[in-house]
Image (cartoon, rainbow, N blue to C red):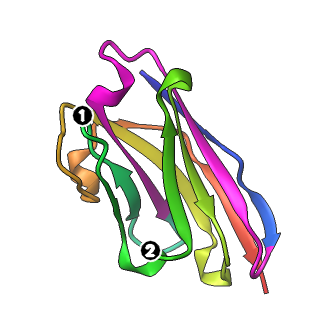
Amino acid sequence: VQLQASGGGLVQAGGPLRLSCAASGFTLTFDDYRIGWFRQAPGKEREGISCFSSRDGSTYDADFVKGRFTISRDNAKNTVYLQMNSLKPEDTAYYYCAATPYSDYVSLDKSEYYYWGQGTQVTVSS
């Protein structure tokens, strides 16, 4: 199983950025996996941002991104997106996507995710 995050870069505060997470090698169908986005800033714990549950595709967002970030998925492309708007300097971090099978409830607990991608750097300048 491979998860490849892309789309990171340098952006000015207030600007948008869209991250993609392309999945491959899944033995189940894509929507049998809960997919989540996480981030980790230097010296900080990895924190959950948004996720899709498996099966019904319910979503959940962390409070600090509600109204700014939106998670979406394209099952035909085995890809999950994170649209980030109104970015702030404190959003600067390495962003990861993660997956776990047969998890039909939402969770941003990183210990509940089995597969992790390499991540992509997002830097927001003030």
Horizontal side, residue 43 vs residue 11: left or right: left
Q: Is residue 25 magenta?
A: yes
Quadrant in the picture for the C terminus: bottom right
Horizontal side, residue 16 vs residue 82: left or right: right
Looking at the rendered structure, the kind of residue marked 1 is: Arg
Viewer-side residue, 5 vs 45: 5
Question: Is residue 119 depicted above or below 17 in this figure?
Answer: above
Category of crowding for the residue at label 2, using alpha-carbon neighbours closer than 10 angstroms: few (below 14), some (14–19), many (at least 20) = few
SS category of the residue bearing label 2: loop
User: Residue 93 occupies which quadrant of the picture?
Assistant: bottom right
Horizontal side, residue 48 vs residue 2: left or right: left
Q: Position of residue 83 (x, y in %)?
A: 61, 58
Q: Position of residue 20 (x, y in %)?
A: 61, 42
In the image, what residue occupies the spot 50% across and 26% down?
Answer: 78
Question: Is residue 8 depicted above or below 122 in this figure?
Answer: above
Q: Position of residue 56 (x, y in %)?
A: 25, 40
Looking at the rendered structure, the kind of residue marked 2 is: Lys
- For label 1, the residue is 55
Instruction: Find the distance from the CA under tag 1 to the CA under tag 2.
Output: 32 Å
User: Residue 11 occupies which quadrant of the picture?
Assistant: bottom right
Q: Which residues are magenta?
A: 12-39
SS category of the residue bearing label 1: loop
- For label 2, the residue is 44
Q: Position of residue 73 (x, y in %)?
A: 49, 40
In the image, what residue occupies the spot 32% across and 12% down?
Answer: 27
Quadrant in the picture for the N terminus: top left
Q: Is residue 37 magenta?
A: yes
User: Residue 103 occupies which quadrant of the picture?
Assistant: top left
